[in-house]
Image (cartoon, rainbow, N blue to C red):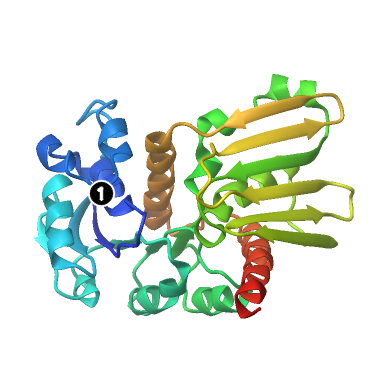
Amino acid sequence: MLKLGIIGSSPGNGHPYSWSAIFNGYEPDAMAECPYPVIPAYLAKQRFPEDRLANGQVTHIWTQDPENSRHIAQASRIAHVVDNFSDLIGKVDGVLLARDDAEHHEEMAVPFLRAGMPVYIDKPLALDRQTERRIFAEERFPGQIYTGTPLTHAVELMLDSATQEQLGEIRHVHAVTPKYWNTYAVHIIEPVLAYLDLNSSPVQTEVMRSGEAVILVARWENGKSATFTVTGSLPAKITFDIFGTDGHEQRVFADSFNAFKTSLQRFCTGVQNRQRMFDLKRQSLVTELIECGSQEMDKAVRQ
């Protein structure tokens, strides 16, 4: 069984609670006080210990707030709270960097990468390709880093062979997510690239911004296209409208627990086999599209 440490906390992101519970199970009374009600709600629908991941255990935690760390540890059955995130070096087999404010990923991941420890870096890995290249340059072996959106592995978003046949060739996808470009755009960009089977840069992009909302339209040389809409504070479901030459299909993301569980399982498999568990070229394209939208936001701030 892998011993894992979980580090970091960022506003609006409850992954330290949920990811740890997926491995360890949880204490219902303490988890009921989790500031993200959706987490105890979906955990209560599972059967523990049967539904937990049995090939790992989160044994150590660090967040910026010791009181927060202690509450997460109590709720998600984590034995040790450490004073500094670097204290995990030598104590665990791998690290879950569970914060989605990507501007902190490099500084927090590099000490572990240099120590030869596998790191799961929460999505998005980086907001620009230059930072992404620096992070991957610190890898000591292929697959030391795991990253990406768990939505790529959500069963309810997948297309079976019969549906694919009914759709024909997929030519356009319109994807929508709530919240903010820098934290949530990755959740729609990566699955859309999988639907369209794309690993190359678009030949044309257009970004529109209205307040918190960001829309990126991208077109590729082969005629395929995508529209990525991030609604900001406006409520929305994570939705994919898929348009093929012969039909249209809609998919809506619904099952956070099993998407997270599959993603964490893949991280563990990569650690155990020293194997990269995602497509590096597609990951680079994800970052390129995130950077495209982020640059437009930066311009708006400067104006």
Q: Along the horizontal axis of the image, is 271 left or right of 298?
A: left
Residue at screen point 60% across, 47% down: 188
- Residue 196 x %, y %: 75, 43
Image quarter of residue 23: top left
Q: Amino acid at mark 1?
A: Tyr
Quadrant the C terminus occupies: bottom right
Q: Secondary structure at mark 1?
A: helix
- In this orientation, which residue lies closer to the viewer: 142 or 217? 217
- Residue 192 x %, y %: 67, 45
Can you see residue 45?
Answer: yes
- Residue 283 x %, y %: 61, 60
Image quarter of residue 300: bottom right
Q: Along the horizontal axis of the image, is 65 left or right of 201?
A: left
Using the image, determine if residue 136 lies above or below residue 58.
Answer: below
Residue at screen point 84% across, 54% down: 220
Q: Identify residue for label 1.
A: 17
- In this orientation, which residue lies closer to the viewer: 61 or 114? 61
- Residue 19 x %, y %: 30, 48
Q: Along the horizontal axis of the image, is 19 left or right of 178?
A: left
Can you see residue 202?
Answer: no
Image quarter of residue 205: bottom right
Residue at screen point 60% across, 73% down: 128
What crowding class fits label 1: few (fewer than 14 Cα within 10 Å), some (14-19), or many (20 or more)? many
Please count the marks in the image. Answer: 1
- In this orientation, which residue lies closer to the viewer: 285 or 276? 285
Q: Along the horizontal axis of the image, is 9 left or right of 69?
A: right
